Amino acid sequence: MTVKYTKDHEWIKVDGTTGTVGISDYAQSQLGDVVFVELPEVGRELTQGGESAVVESVKAASEVYAPVAGTVTAANEALVDEPALVNSAAQTGGWFYQITIADPSQLDGLMDEDAYKAYVEGLA
């Protein structure tokens, strides 16, 4: 599986034509304690860069943007009952939704893990 990142700190783990989307560990650390997550509905069509979810923390509310275009096939309902999963497992159990990737070539414009680490280090 390949993991790609956006400059807005979303990650997408790609397995064939399915992508699993969440926010990076860096993003959750910047947000602080997550208290609410609004997930997209299954079947919703997303556009690349369009708003796909909302995450609220004790500090602020932030939009989560779709790293690629596609159709939502699953939402992580565990986050509804336990939004703190975003803090404790941002890049594993704290995923937001799964999407069928409409155009795999859009992944080429995203960063790999090394490029994302360098990007985050540049923000410090």
Image (cartoon, rainbow, N blue to C red):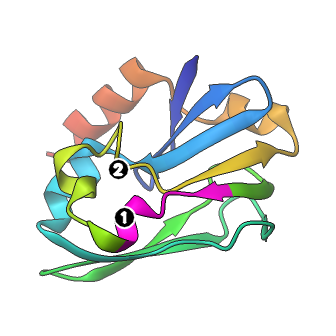
Amino acid type, callout 2:
Gly
Q: Check disc 1 and report its element: helix, strand or loop.
A: helix
Quarter-of-image position of residue 105 = top right
Q: Earlier in the sequence, mark 2 or mark 1?
A: 1
Is residue 40 shown in magenta? Answer: no
Q: Position of residue 45 (x, y in %)?
A: 82, 67
Quarter-of-image position of residue 43 = bottom right
Amino acid type, callout 1:
Leu
Quarter-of-image position of residue 33 = bottom left
| Residues tagged 2 and 1 counted as in contact (Cβ below 8 A) | yes
Q: Which mark is residue 22?
A: none
Residue at screen point 65% across, 55% down: 74
Q: Position of residue 7 (x, y in %)?
A: 46, 49
Mark 2 Cα shell of 10 Å, populated few (<14), some (14-19), many (≥20): many
Mark 1 Cα shell of 10 Å, populated few (<14), some (14-19), many (≥20): many
Question: Which residue, given by chain and number where applicable, does mark 2 sit on?
Answer: 94
| Near-viewer residue (92 or 116) | 92
Above or below: residue 33 compared with residue 48: below
Residue at screen point 12% across, 81% down: 58
Residue at screen point 49% across, 57% down: 76
Q: Check disc 2 and report its element: helix, strand or loop.
A: loop
In the picture, the quarter occupied by the N terminus is top right
Q: Position of residue 62 (x, y in %)?
A: 37, 76
Q: Position of residue 25 (x, y in %)?
A: 25, 43
Residue at screen point 47% across, 64% down: 77
Q: Is residue 86 left or right of residue 3?
A: left
Q: CA distance from mark 2 to mark 1?
A: 7 Å
Q: Which mark is residue 79?
A: 1
Q: Which residues are magenta?
A: 74-80
